[in-house]
């Protein structure tokens, strides 16, 4: 085991105000980690962290109105999220990102709750993305291998190996692990580019599958399904805050983090908007499979061109697999830094705050979350038909509310900025958001409203679920996880 990192109180001025870039608030922890991430790495990291190709099928299935929903989600959630991350990472480029920002603004209890929810929900997330990746990987070998998608030995072996490859690369060092994330960013975007190119070809040849009219583009907000879809796809834009959790490992983070946000944001919005339109041009909404819809669309577009490009669908499946494994690498590296900093603060066992003596990475935090994810990966299989399977499903339902809590804190950090600090930052040119305090309230308020709205929608049960049972699973399940976090906090407070 490595030696614990020393915890050093942050320096501050008497007033707590920022007077220039050199006198910006000191990091919360005196942690020396290798700064391995540059602008290119962060742009690709943002792409692989945010873009979920599966969302193209989910949104396109509702028809052309999904395009308007994407635009509204981008304006009311994604833009506020990007501005909040840029502003807070410019001021506080701390290791731990959203946890550290919340701790600075609202104190240790709120900081821990934010960090705990962010960490635990992502540990629960890996198995879902890995299983999806294993299923899509069968398309690389063609339809003859599709039967593997129903083979649990194959799915579990693939998922387990992919998880631990990503873990190993991230333990060796971010300088090595970033290449997995970079490859994932390229792979993810390559799928979007292929899909969009085929959509353009269909439009040019007038072989479109879905007509676009003003009526079909107008969302029906009187339908709960449409409202629920909008709340869901708004959070398809989540993930821009992930890179900031590695603030201590980014070259010149005060400049690099905002620059990466500005470069990657239009690429992300473009992928979702144009990708959804391309799917609708290639396949009628009613025929779209929400799991493998993007492969359906690519296959349909390739058949329009001819047999010479039949290889496009298998190639897209391979790119998707690389993108997903890179995504797992990104969502391992980021939350591990949150757990690492919580360990430094003694609210997690101190071992979480250890760094590898050779590679300089928070290897204990990475290993523990990978071990927990491995156990969760096996739960739905080993417990098939038992109470364990029901427990696993309840855990997935409980994720919904836990996921939104850190975003409430993200936007609250922006809204409740300290007036004295803000005045100095505006005067010294450190503030990114225009309009001073009013601009922060407007931007942060938009993001906060969408987050709370999504939480309310999440509590409404599906049509095939009992209202009481759904409420108990979602709210009760989230409450159990928060109570578990409270136990960690209480034990850590006593230890500290």
Image (spheres, rainbow, N blue to C red):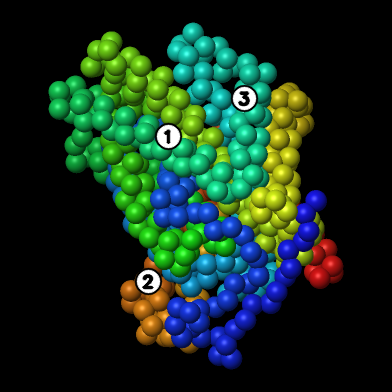
CA–CA distance in space, label 1 to label 2: 31 Å
Q: Nearer the viewer, residue 91 or 153?
A: 91
**Residue under label 1:** 187
Residue 58, percent across and down?
42, 34
Quarter where residue 319 is shown: top left
Q: Residue at x 73, y 63 (%)?
A: 5
The kind of secondary structure element at disc 2 is: loop
CA–CA distance in space, label 2 to label 3: 44 Å
Badge 3: residue crowd in 10 Å (few <14, some 14–19, many ≥20): some
Disc with the residue nearer the chain's start (1 vs 2): 1
Asked if the residue at tag 3 contacts the one at tag 2, i.e. Cβ–Cβ closer than 8 Å, the answer is: no
**Farthest front residue?**
358
Q: Residue at x 63, y 16 (%)?
A: 151
- Camera-near label (1 vs 2) is 1
Q: Which mark is residue 123?
A: none
Q: Do we see residue 326 in this rendering?
A: yes
Q: Residue at x 54, y 29 (%)?
A: 132
The kind of secondary structure element at disc 3 is: helix
**Residue under label 3:** 158
**Residue under label 2:** 432
Taking the image as shown, residue 19 lies to the left or right of residue 341, namely: left
- Is 18 rendered above or below residue 348? below
Residue 299, percent across and down?
34, 19
- Is 99 rendered above or below residue 105? above
């Amino acid at each position: 085991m490595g030696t614990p990192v020393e915890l050093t109180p942050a320096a501050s001025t008497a007033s707590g105000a920022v007077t220039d870039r050199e006198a910006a608030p000191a990091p919360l922890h005196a942690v020396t980690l290798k700064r391995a991430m540059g602008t290119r790495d962060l742009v690709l990291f943002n792409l692989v962290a945010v873009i979920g190709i599966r969302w193209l099928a989910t949104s396109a299935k509702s028809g052309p109105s999904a395009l308007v929903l994407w635009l509204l989600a981008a304006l009311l959630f994604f833009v506020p999220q990007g501005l909040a991350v840029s502003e807070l990472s410019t001021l506080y480029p701390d290791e731990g990102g959203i946890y550290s920002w919340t701790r600075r603004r609202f104190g240790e209890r709120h900081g821990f709750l934010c960090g705990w929810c962010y960490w635990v929900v992502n540990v629960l997330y890996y198995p879902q993305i890995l299983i999806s990746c294993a299923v899509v990987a069968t398309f690389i070998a063609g339809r003859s291998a599709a039967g593997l998608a129903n083979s649990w030995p194959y799915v579990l072996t693939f998922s387990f190996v992919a998880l631990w490859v990503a873990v190993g690369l991230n333990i060796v060092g971010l300088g090595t692990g970033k290449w997995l994330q970079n490859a994932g960013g390229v792979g993810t975007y390559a799928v979007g580019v292929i899909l969009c190119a085929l959509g353009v070809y269909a439009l040019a040849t007038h072989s479109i599958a879905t007509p676009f009219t003003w009526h079909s583009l107008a969302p029906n907000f009187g339908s709960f399904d449409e409202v629920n879809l909008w709340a869901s796809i708004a959070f398809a834009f989540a993930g821009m805050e992930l890179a900031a959790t590695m603030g201590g490992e980014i070259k010149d983070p005060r400049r690099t983090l905002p620059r990466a946000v500005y470069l990657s944001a239009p690429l992300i919005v473009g992928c979702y908007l144009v990708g959804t339109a391309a799917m609708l041009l290639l396949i009628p909404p009613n025929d779209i499979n929400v799991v493998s819809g993007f492969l359906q669309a690519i296959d349909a577009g390739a058949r329009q061109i001819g047999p010479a490009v039949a290889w496009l669908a298998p190639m897209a499946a391979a790119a998707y697999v690389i993108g997903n494994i890179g995504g797992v690498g990104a969502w391992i590296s980021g939350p591990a830094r949150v757990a690492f900093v919580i360990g430094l603060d003694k609210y997690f066992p101190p071992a979480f705050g250890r760094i590898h003596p050779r590679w300089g990475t928070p290897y204990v935090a990475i290993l523990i979350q990978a071990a927990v994810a491995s156990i969760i990966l096996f739960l739905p299989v080993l417990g098939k038909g038992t109470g364990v399977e029901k427990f696993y499903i309840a855990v997935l339902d409980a994720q919904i509310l836990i996921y939104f809590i850190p975003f409430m804190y993200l936007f609250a950090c922006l809204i409740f900025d300290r007036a004295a600090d803000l005045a100095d930052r505006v005067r010294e040119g450190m503030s990114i958001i225009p309009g001073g305090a009013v601009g922060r309230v407007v931007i942060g308020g938009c993001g906060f409203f969408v987050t709370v709205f999504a939480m309310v929608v999440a509590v409404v049960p599906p049509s095939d679920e009992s209202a009481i049972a759904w409420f108990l699973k979602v709210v009760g399940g989230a409450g159990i996880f928060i109570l578990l976090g409270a136990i960690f906090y209480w034990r850590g407070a006593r230890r500290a």
